Amino acid sequence: MTAFAPDWLYLREPADAAARATELVDPLRGFLDFLPDGDEVVIRDLGCGTGSLGRWLAARLPGTQRWILHDHDTDLLTHARGSLPRTALDGSPIDVVAEQRDITALRAADLAGTSLVTASALLDLLTKDEVTALATAIVEAGCAALLMLSVTGKVELSPADPLDSAVAAAFNAHQRRVTEDGRRLLGPNAVDAAATAFGRLGATVVRADSAWRLGPDQAELQRQWLEGWVGAAVEQLPELRPVADVYLQRRLEMAQSAELRAVIHHGDLLVLPPSLEAAA
């Protein structure tokens, strides 16, 4: 799995929080209401990073919660474990534990007793087989899932530039690349692939848009996002470099002078178990 620097994850957290589809929280609470009274809500956060999704979600949900944070990076797990809120929406206690493990190897037995599986900016880093296996594990375990902020490949920059579409196409191809270990990533196809996989298993799938909307007051986030976006495009299509270097400099100057706006589209999924379809 790709490693991300904590500084980048903290920088993007406000944009992530503003983008997340809040309309999915109420139906998720409705699912949790069907749990037996007094039952602890067990939430597994896959690829938790610094814990930004937990910080956003935990205090929006009622009831006693036990968060199990999964990531391959022990430093990120340490950051995350100490940063989640300790009380739920209704004042109930929240317990947090961390487990380093390969999330692509999770199966239904590993999710026994889990109420909810969460993930943020994860699905697009997986392959079709990995997404199918994860969907199967979640549905067979009978838990819900809230899978947020997967890239969908659409970027809108204002003012527009003639090179925008070429850079976007190369970046999207990079997101779908075959990695050194032979894994073909889903990239912008991930939301559709996951929705299809869960739907075939009989789960209820609710989709929502979750776009970053970066304004002139977010110049540093614009800068780092632009450098990563253009850098991945050039890595995928090296012949772009001569024009991409000039393009990047032009865009960075616009960000610095508060002239640039960017909308980077993502998709969120709420998945409810097949037995909850009628109640949802």
Image (spheres, rainbow, N blue to C red):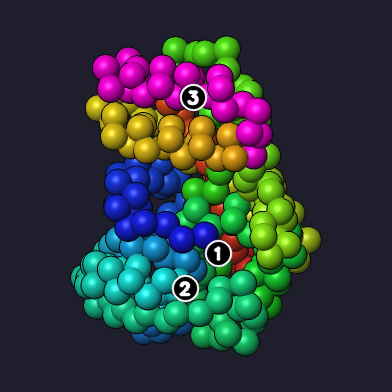
Instruction: Please state the extent of the stretch shown in magenta in the rendering.
Output: 236-260
Q: Residue at x 40, y 21 (%)?
A: 249
Left or right of 186 in this view: 235: left
Of the residues under marks 1 and 2, which one precedes in the sequence? Answer: 1
Q: Is the residue marked by circle 1 packed among few (<14), some (14-19), or many (20+) residues within 10 Å?
A: few
Q: Is the residue marked by circle 3 packed among few (<14), some (14-19), or many (20+) residues within 10 Å?
A: some
Q: Amino acid at mark 2?
A: His
Front disc: 3 or 1: 3
181 part of magenta stretch: no
Circle 2: element type: loop
- Disc 1 to disc 2: CB gap under 8 Å: yes
Q: Residue at x 36, y 56 (%)?
A: 5
Would you name the residue on which mark 1 appears? 1
241 part of magenta stretch: yes
Would you name the residue on which mark 3 appears? 245
Question: What secondary structure is the stretch in magenta mostly built from?
Answer: helix
Q: Residue at x 36, y 32 (%)?
A: 222
x and y percentages locating residue 116 in the rendered image: 49, 71
> Hey, which quadrant is residue 218 in on the image?
top left
Q: Residue at x 69, y 48 (%)?
A: 177
Q: Is the residue marked by circle 2 packed among few (<14), some (14-19), or many (20+) residues within 10 Å?
A: some
x and y percentages locating residue 174 in the rendered image: 64, 43
